[in-house]
Image (cartoon, helix red, strand yellow):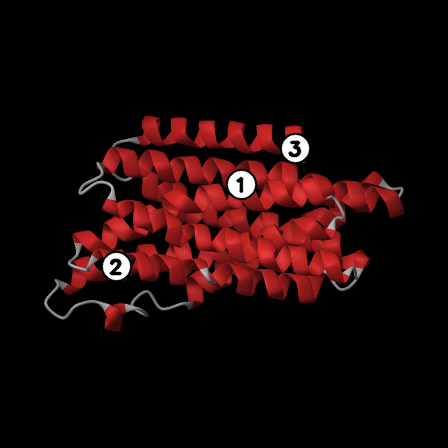
Amino acid sequence: MNLELFIYGLVASFFAGSATGFGGSFIYLKKKISKKTEDILLGFSAGIMLAASFFSLLTPSVEILEESIKSSFYVALVVSVGFLLGAVLFWLVDKTVPEDYFMRFSPEELDKKASKKIWIFVLAITVHNFPEGMSSALGFMTGDIGKGITLASGIGIQNVPEGLAIAIALVAKGFSKGKAIAIAFISGLVEPVGGLLGLIVFGLYDIVLPIGLAFSAGAMIFVISKEIIPETHKRGFEIEATTGLIVGFILMMFLDLTFG
């Protein structure tokens, strides 16, 4: 294992996660952001994650395996297994984590049902920050610094609207802007934790790195399909949210192909 790349990956996952708190700070710029804008921004985030999964995770996974495995069938099999493991693990997380886990943090005077919905949303973003952290860290372990920087930057960019979405939801339910930003920042700190775990599990040995990259892709795509896209299609702005997704996908694809 290359210690320098390990440190790069860990630092990158921290800065990518910190972008969530940075996004939350934009709550000071505007008192109210429309629901349509929220859905467009979340769609944009989903698009970046989708493109990152394909171009920055699955493609390097295949390329690394092809250097040591001559059979295309076995390359596809290994990548598929890694991808499936990531999706299944986060399906289990989704089934296991209690939906009212964060209820004790909400103000007592708030309506409990409404508060629960807000915290489920916050928890969903927090949980999906974990595979993002793994992805931003493991991108460096391929040995391609440019691709690692591009992947971490893309994840950081899409964390900005997510942090803003968290802050908007919490302020709407009575939290001060300062507390809302702090919670957004804390939710992003899951990323360096995910990055460290990913580096330890998948970065120590070159042979398991491709599995780790595919694992991260599977986890991110599960979260996109299970949490983010449905959230953007609840309020009648499906076309706008899909447009945001397409723009985000193109941006991340462009960054990866140009600078990766």
The residue depicted at 48 percent of the width and 35 percent of the height is 47
Question: Toward which corner of the image does residue 85 lie, by quadrant?
Answer: bottom right
Residue 207 left/right relative to 137? right
- Disc 2 secondary structure class: helix
Give the camera-side residue of 205 and 189.
189
- Disc 3 secondary structure class: helix
On screen, residue 101 above or below 153: below
The residue depicted at 34 percent of the width and 33 percent of the height is 40
Q: Are marks 1 and 2 in contact (CB under 8 Å)?
A: no
| Label 3 Cα crowd, 10 Å radius (few <14 / some 14-19 / many 20+) | some
- Sequence-wise first label, 3 or 2: 2
Quarter of the image with the C terminus is top right
The residue depicted at 12 percent of the width and 62 percent of the height is 111
The x, y position of residue 241, in whole percent, is: 35, 32
- Disc 1 secondary structure class: helix
Question: Toward which corner of the image does residue 114 lie, by quadrant?
Answer: bottom left
In the displayed orientation, state which residue is furthest to the bottom: 104
The residue depicted at 45 percent of the width and 55 percent of the height is 18
| Label 2 Cα crowd, 10 Å radius (few <14 / some 14-19 / many 20+) | some
Residue 18 left/right relative to 82? left
Amino acid at pointer 3: Phe
Q: Are marks 3 and 1 in contact (CB under 8 Å)?
A: no
Cα separation, mark 3 vs mark 2, equals 36 Å
The mark found on residue 154 in the picture is 1
Give the camera-side residue of 2 and 209.
2
The x, y position of residue 155, in whole percent, is: 52, 45
Frontmost of labels 1 and 2 is 2
Q: Which residue is mark 2?
A: 178
The x, y position of residue 164, in whole percent, is: 32, 47
Q: Are marks 3 and 2 in contact (CB under 8 Å)?
A: no
